[in-house]
Image (tube, rainbow, N blue to C red):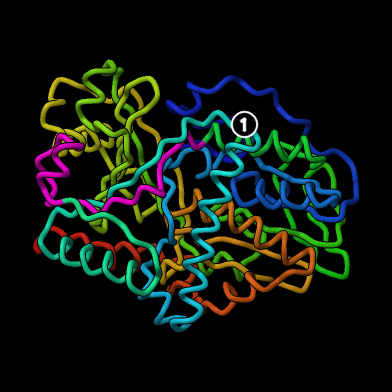
Amino acid sequence: MTAAGEAHAPSWYADSVPAVALRQPLTGDTTADICVLGAGYTGLSAALTLAERGYRVVLLEANRVGWGASGRNGGQAIVGYGCEVDTLEHLVGAEDARALFEFSRDGMRLLRDRIARHQIDCDWRDGHASVPIKPRQERMLRAGLIDLAQRYDYPLQWWDRTQLRGQLDSPRYRGAMFDPHSGHLHPLAYAQGLARAAEAAGAVIHEQSPVLQLIRGARPQLRTAHGTVTADHVVIAGNAWLEGIAPELESRIMPVGTYIGASAVLGQARAQSLIRNDMAVADVSWALDYFRLSRDHRLLFGGQASYSALPPPGLRGVMTRRMRAVFPQLADVELEYVWGGYVDITRNRAPHWGRLTPNVYFAQGFSGHGIAAAGLAGQVLAEAIAGQAERLDVFERIPHRPFPGGRMLRTPLLVAAMSWYKLRDALW
């Protein structure tokens, strides 16, 4: 992981996109209709939506566009959120849960529309498979598939082991829940495309401009070391990297390290023999594996989350062994890149979006499902700022509690809890 203020972390993503000149850091004091903190998907989506509506938008990014999770993630764009629909029903009731799921479908449509409308070259591919390893996981997926079709009008496909092996050459999985509407993309290329679209609409982006303080009031301010932006409204989209800007938000998310590797180039034939339909794949264990192919015929393989906020020891070797457990035929293949970064999770894995004050908005807590949902979040916040808050009102009804233990103890407590879930996956 790279520290704040540095360029993109070394990764296949960073090496496979054209270099982009540094945008001018903020110097001096300025004003705007809206100031956005964070140039990930949420902040860029909010900036784009608001600029298209004619607002004067200034966006402050501590590092580079897509520096955080938006430029390092697994690239899997999935309908839904980090929690299951039954969790949403428990939290907000059946009616609001149905509305929230429909909003997530809006997010996927928005993602596809922006790629097409702004001609963002980000290697979009259709198709995502959720795959079980254990009988318990298969029962869970089958029940979820029926529920989504009957009560959420979202039919998916169930593939048995034979059907799955026709597309995925791995002996590890019992079947698949296949979603043709989800898919995968190059996450950093998508973030850079959103930034270009926002700038074309009139938004101003300042990189290398870490925010030191949020000053609340009738016209809130974001202060950096070299200037301030005073605005009518502020959007906080820092997620796992807020670092003191809004303590009441930080207490309700936990930074979790997640790691991805890129194999050496396999060649077209060998790569396509692994995943014949070029879909993205993720298992449903608590400490999951997820993988897909790249445009230059590598296997991109992710997993090995770290709840202690420290990279696991021997990370490259661990990731290589996990890759070969899924694909034994890659025994001669090494990982050419390994990188990681933080995602932010909430206690219930549901999205945490809303208002800190009547003119300070936020979205966080994507819990590993942020590609489509974060774009939706930016649009939902922008709508609320423009006076259409109906969708944000539904998200604000989701209750969120802080992680126990405060700053000192919350990470050890989470590590202990996650150890139990990993043990459960291993035993049954």
Q: Is residue 226 above or below residue 262?
A: below
Say which residue appears at 56% left-offset and 64% top-offset.
250
143 left or right of 185 in image: left
Q: Is residue 335 above or below residue 350?
A: above
Say which residue appears at 74% left-offset and 57% top-offset.
213
In this rendering, the count of numbered labels is: 1
Classify 10 Å Cα crowding around label 1: few (below 14), some (14-19), many (20 and above): few
220 left or right of 180 in image: right
Say which residue appears at 61% left-offset and 53% top-offset.
238
What's under tag 1, amino acid-wise?
Answer: Gln
Say which residue appears at 28% left-offset and 25% top-offset.
335
Q: Position of residue 235 (x, y in %)?
A: 71, 58
Judging depth in this view, the residue of 321 and 5 nearest the camera is 321
Q: Which residues are magenta?
A: 160-187
Q: Position of residue 76 (x, y in %)?
A: 40, 44
Residue 315 part of the magenta-drawn span: no
Q: Position of residue 236 (x, y in %)?
A: 67, 58
Q: Is residue 405 above or below residue 333?
A: below
Judging depth in this view, the residue of 403 and 348 nearest the camera is 348
Q: Position of residue 283 (x, y in %)?
A: 24, 51
Q: Secondary structure at mark 1?
A: loop
207 left or right of 424 in image: right
Residue 177 part of the magenta-drawn span: yes
Picture quadrant of residue 151: bottom left
State the residue position of label 1: 119
Q: Which quarter of the image is occupied by the C terminus?
A: bottom left
